[in-house]
Amino acid sequence: MRSLLLLSAFCLLAAALAAEVKKPAAAAAPGTAEKLSPKAATLAERSAGLAFSLYQAMAKDQAVENILVSPVVVASSLGLVSLGGKATTASQAKAVLSAEQLRDEEVHAGLGELLRSLSNSTARNVTWKLGSRLYGPSSVSFADDFVRSSKQHYNCEHSKINFRDKR
């Protein structure tokens, strides 16, 4: 019998859908989790929807037995594509996220907030270790603005690598 595994998506979906609109700091009880802003909560819901769509598309393939989809990884990857892409590429990445109506900064700030919220082990009483690294050829320099913004919003590290080295 074919087994379908969506553990990561369900875990992150539960955290994302439990998000509520951020309340004023004075209203929050000490030690409680900080709530997501409306933009971040919207992106969380759309990321979960995208993950389920991907899951359903992959589950149609009879050869696929185990499926593991992380809505946050998919969304943050598309966010990085949108951040580094220009014109058509950036708008296509935003369209896949169903975030066309949001300004670029709202998308990146919202996804960054979602990543920080999910990584907050104190607030969630769980430990998620999320990592992101972008590898580029040693002959190319990353744009300073892209490096700064991707670290700020996505906690993305950057490395240069010699892709021609056969070791």
Image (cartoon, rainbow, N blue to C red):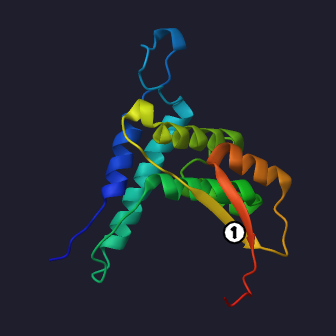
> Who's the residue at 68% across and 91% down the image?
166
The part of the image, by quadrant, that contains residue 28 is: top left
What residue is drawn where x is 54% and y is 50%? Answer: 98
Q: Is residue 61 left or right of residue 156?
A: left
**Percent coordinates x, y for residue 52 in the rendering:** 37, 57
Residue in front for this viewpoint, 71 or 90: 71
Residue drawn at the location 39% of the way across and 34% of the way down: 124
Pick whichever, 96 or 34, lies toward us. 34
Percent position of residue 42, x then y: 49, 38
Q: Which residue is mark 1?
A: 135
Vertical position of residue 118 compared to residue 88: above or below: above
Image quarter where the C terminus lies is bottom right
Q: Amino acid at mark 1?
A: Tyr
Residue 1, visible in the rendered structure:
yes
Provide residue 43's location: percent of width, then percent of height.
51, 43
Q: Mark 1: which secondary structure?
A: strand
